[in-house]
Image (cartoon, grey):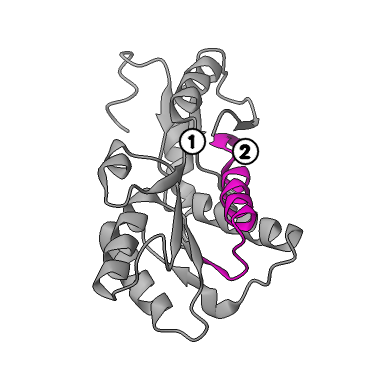
Amino acid sequence: LERLGNGRLDGLLVAEVPSSPSAYREIRSVGLPWLLLNRRTTASHRYVILDDEGATRMAVDHLAQLGHRVVAHLAGPTSADTATRRKAGFRSAMAAHGLAVRRQHLVEADYTYEGGFTAMVELLDRPLRPTAVVVANVASAIGALRAAHVAGVTVPDELSVVSIHDLSLATYLDPPLTTVRMPVEKLGERGIEILSNLSPDDLIEEVVRGPM
């Protein structure tokens, strides 16, 4: 942050939530326009986010249309705002379809391959195995697919898996991973657009929606 106030920058996009309120004071002290990107926090009302709730609802809608009634959610870490929003979308979509959200079918998974693997192992070991899983992150979904393979659970014959976000790698998996593609480029473009017209004291709370 000390290097930011040297006149060589015009604004700051923050893609990670600072861990303490004092960090926001430090950002403000630089005197540059700044904006949180796809993150929200009670310490600030300056953000542009994606429609994570809508994305998870879309995933549940897809699975419900396929006839699934027992759907689990490998949720992201509770510390991540994106995970909170995706879980909220999962709950609302399940309720809209008259499907039960069982505590045993909500498992926290870090946004990593290892996190998804560990969470899926835990989920498959619990009673009343689900027929479908919505995973909050594509990296953890890849780990979850590996865990299902190790456990001898075939995807998608015995278990359907849908992930939020997308990577080109998802297409080359066997079987390919179904994903809800988020308009990340549109988010970045909108962030730059807002930042270029933002004063240090403006309040911004916006959700970027687009094709998913």
Disc 1 crowd, CA 10 A, few/some/many (<14, 14-19, 20+): many
Which comes sooner in the sequence, label 1 or label 2?
Answer: 2
In the figure, 8 relative to 12: above or below? above
Q: Quadrant of residue 52?
A: top right
The location of residue 174, given as percent across then percent down, is: 27, 51
* Residue at x-position 34% and y-position 75%: 121
Classify residue 152 as left or right of residue 20: left
Q: Quick one: quadrant of the C terminus?
A: top right
Front in this rendered view, residue 14 or 108: 108
Mark linked to residue 48: none
Name the residue beneath numbered marker 2. 45
In this orientation, does residue 145 appear? yes
Q: Which residues are magenta?
A: 44-72
* Residue at x-position 34% and y-position 22%: 5
Instruction: Check disc 1 and report its element: helix, strand or loop.
Output: loop
* Residue at x-position 31% and y-position 71%: 118
In the figure, 197 relative to 107: above or below? above
Residue 90 magenta-highlighted: no
* Residue at x-position 29% and y-position 74%: 152
In the figure, 180 relative to 154: above or below? above
Name the residue beneath numbered marker 1. 182
The location of residue 169, given as percent across then percent down, is: 27, 41
Q: Quadrant of residue 151?
A: bottom left
Residue 64 magenta-highlighted: yes
